[in-house]
Image (spheres, rainbow, N blue to C red):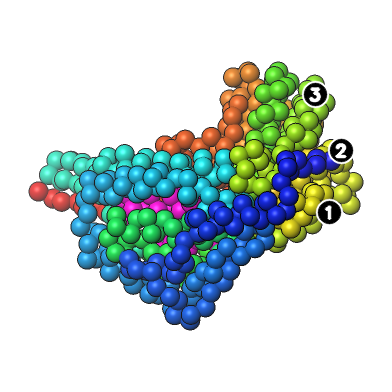
Amino acid sequence: MSSQPDSVDDSRSDVLQRHRDAADAVVPERTALYIGGEFTEPAGGETFATTDPTTNQELASVARGRTADVDRAVAAAWDGFETEWSGYDAGDRQRVLLAIADAIEAHADELAQLETLDNGKPISEATIDVHSAAEQFRYFAGIVRENGGETMTDGSRYGQVIAEPYGVVGQVIPWNFPLLMASWKLAPALAAGNCSVLKPAEQTPLSALRLAELIDDIVPDGVVNVVTGFGEEAGEPLTRHSDVRKVAFTGSTAVGKQVMKNAAENVTDVTLELGGKSPVVVFPDVDVSTAVQLVTAAIFYNTGECCEAGSRLFIHEDVADDVLEGLVQAIDGMEIGDPLRDETDLGPKVSREQVDRTIDYLDAARDAGGEFLAGGDRPDDEVLSEGCYVEPTLIEGLDHDHDAVQEEIFGPVLEVFRWDDYETMIELANDVDYGLAGGVITDDLARANEAARDIEAGYIWVNSYHDLAPGLPFGGYKQSGIGRELSADTLDHYQQTKTINLSL
């Protein structure tokens, strides 16, 4: 069975016109680098195009930063830190973070449209991302005053343990949640007292540039710098820069390993949020409709372009047929179409390159005898033909050691495995190199607790998925990364510990 798109009454010209109108309204006029509080041209004068994945038409010409521009941004960040930002106390930084949150929320509609145009995510999901980004700044504003260190006394000795900022940090963010990932990096870095050089993904640079415009009058010059460009030309010199004291990266495991090597040259501290191949375990006591709803959200949210996506489904034999039937019906009922429409459930992937990558995995799964219960190809629809679309796909019958099961596809593809023996199922659930997240669906709290503890992953949802609450640490086991985000723990990753041992 194959899912077919429902493009409502849109024609190709309708979609093109809608996207042209939106781009005219929200695409930033200034797409230069943002360094030292100014928008400036790259040293080499080069640009590259960022493309709307729905229409495959150019949205904007973006500055192509290289090593010289990274050097300039790092110098500006240190200047901003030494001349002004290092003098801001916790209350000052709190006020700045709250003002940034206010600015994001005041421009929420604009930012959501910008994300949809540049990334392809449905406008409903982009809107959630924007408000979640503002929430990150509010959360870290709320805890920044609590980060005061500790004191100890022992007879004639008096000890202080204090946390100090690194000074300048380099931050590299991915294309799947552009604005949200910028907030995940910038909010704790600024709360901890650092200045940042932020390198957005070349596929989706526009929201980071617009954020720079919005905060230009809020943060002192040099506190936030944005260098757009390609990974090899801008990201690599940033992550190996001798004057960058800490590097934070979100992206693929393969690139994350290279970032670690780059940072190691200068013994630079590093945190990494990398790939995932997360299991979702369904027990036999579930309500079928609830399980279908949760599994659908786990894999198809953001078109499956989530590091934590629940991309491997382990479903108990007793309910497998019913749940799979419900999933096929849910997929058939999805509206694949223009992400600027509120009705759209599944938008395009971010680029043709990502489409081709996903299709290669699907072809390999088909060649290996996988049974496609739904999807498995590009949509057969003239309105969507020029966009970067892949059908939501459900596959059963693959060996667990197949590449499509072991590797992160980063698309709307779910592999299904039936189970009746708990220990065997857990062994398979953990039989991947990743350990970012997982899901457990059951009404039995004892079972839920057992499975959550047995799954080798850093973040486990029980009877929910993708609900990332500020304050709960997010990060992975194994090759899914180092460090935690979204919580007070994150501040520790952006600070150095100093001990003062004073004999009285």
Task: State the residue in front, 419 or 404.
Answer: 404
State which quadrant residue 308 falls in: top right
Outermost bottom residue? 44
Closer to the N terminus: mark 1 or mark 3?
3
Residue 194 sits inside the magenta stretch: yes
Give how far across and how far down residue 194 sits, in percent.
32, 57
Mark 1 and mark 3: Cα distance apart in space: 27 Å
Where is residue 198, by image quadrant?
A: bottom left
| Residue at 71% from the left image edge and 46% from the top image edge | 10
* Secondary structure of residue under mark 3: helix
Q: Please give the residue where the numbered disc 1 appears in the rendered image.
A: 364
- How far across and how far down the image is residue 28, in percent? 47, 61
Residue name at image x 63 percent, y 33 percent: 439
> Is the residue 41 above or below the residue 500 in the image?
below
Identify the residue shown where x is 87% and y is 38%: 1
Tell me the crowding category of disc 1: few under 14, some 14 to 19, or many 20 or more residues within 10 angstroms, Cα based. some
Kind of residue indicated by mark 3 = Asp
Q: Which amino acid does label 2 sit on?
A: Met
What residue would you read off at disc 3? Answer: 322
> Which residue is disc 2 drawn over?
1
Q: Quick check: 259 above or below 343?
A: below
Q: Which of marks 1 and 3 is in front?
A: 3
Q: Is residue 302 left or right of residue 183?
A: right
- Bin the neighbour count of mark 3 within 10 Å (Cα to Cα): few under 14, some 14-19, many 20 and up: few
Residue 147 falls inside the magenta stretch: no
Q: Please state the horizontal and vertical placement of residue 33, each as a whole percent of the image.
A: 43, 69
For marks 2 and 3 on the same chain, the one whose residue lies earlier in the sequence: 2
The boundaries of the magenta stretch are 179-201
Please tell me which residue lies in front, 137 or 321: 137
